[in-house]
Amino acid sequence: MPRPPADPVRRPGAWGNPATGAAGGAEPGTAGGGPECRSLALRKVDNGKPTGHIERMPQVSVRGKLIAHAETVFRRQGFHGASVLDITSAAGVPKGSFYNHFKSKQELAAEIVRQYSRATDLSMLERDDGRSARERLRAHFASQAQRTSSTGVEFGCLLVTMASETPTAGEEVGTAVRGSISAWGDVLAEVIRQGQQAGEIRSTEPAGDLAAFLIDAFEGGALRGKVTGDATASMRSLDLALDVLDR
């Protein structure tokens, strides 16, 4: 978590960890080999200590590997296009191990959506450096656009990908997507409300409606960018929507 600001933005739980970028992946573990190979994969000699001292290396659980790799698979192939075999192959684990950790592909997808939300960078929204509400909002969305571009604009935003498939992906996935978008809107609405109270935002429309409008404009542009390969589409749509805040 970032250092507490003088005037923090309220964060719903799903968006409360302002870590940048999508959920990070862990390096796959070493599989196969005999006892000696497995021993070398799990342990290392600490040269700074007397010979024979063994320091155990951290291990990534099968569940952790599935989560770490599933986001990329879902982002690139979509919910319906990604099979359990695709996910386990990317994670480097046996297919049969999947159901030891998740009851269904829907449960894993919902967890990925929640982790994506928790990893969203909210630091740009803090009111501790003299920037106006509009400037903070734009900086936040710019960081989100960079987050999408860094993983391939042609694959789009994970929320857009999952949202487009929620009618058939099941209630568990739909609930996670709706909760993430709603929580995001609540955070943005607080910044807009601050701007309205400070006279920085002239629009008298409800802050929640304006927040939803900004998200719709940004994600709509991201969807267009996914189709056209235009990495600037989301921010150009966002800038037009920001103009509405001054009317």
Image (cartoon, helix red, strand yellow):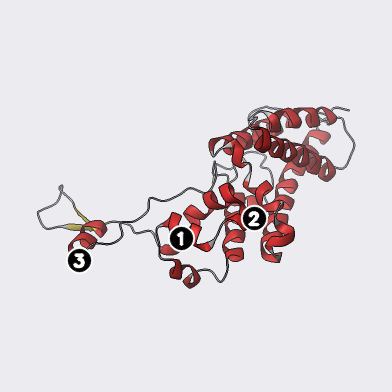
Q: Is residue 123 visible?
A: no
Q: Could you tell me if the residues under marks 1 and 2 are in contact, i.e. CB atoms within 8 Å? A: no
> Badge 3 local density, few (<14 within 10 Å), some, or many (20+)?
few
Q: Tag 3, which secondary structure?
A: helix
Real-space Cα distance between discs 1 and 2? 29 Å
Q: Which residue is mark 1?
A: 88
Q: Which mark is residue 35?
A: 3
Q: Nearer the viewer, mark 1 or mark 2?
A: 1
Tell whether 47 sits left or right of 91. Answer: left
Q: Which residue is mark 2?
A: 13
- Residue type, label 2: Gly
Residue at figure coordinates x 74%, y 52% from the top left: 182
- Residue type, label 3: Pro
Rendering quarter of residue 214 = top right
Residue at figure coordinates x 10%, y 53% from the top left: 50
The percent position of residue 233, horizontal first and vertical second, equals: 70, 30
Q: Number of labelled discs?
A: 3
Rendering quarter of residue 223 = top right
Q: Quadrant of the C terminus?
A: top right
**Lower position in the chain sequence, tag 1 or tag 2:** 2
> Badge 2 local density, few (<14 within 10 Å), some, or many (20+)?
few
Q: Nearer the viewer, mark 3 or mark 2?
A: 3
The percent position of residue 48, horizontal first and vertical second, equals: 15, 47
Work out whether residue 116 or residue 86 is closer to the camera in this orientation and state it. Answer: 86
Tell whether 4 sits left or right of 66. Answer: right
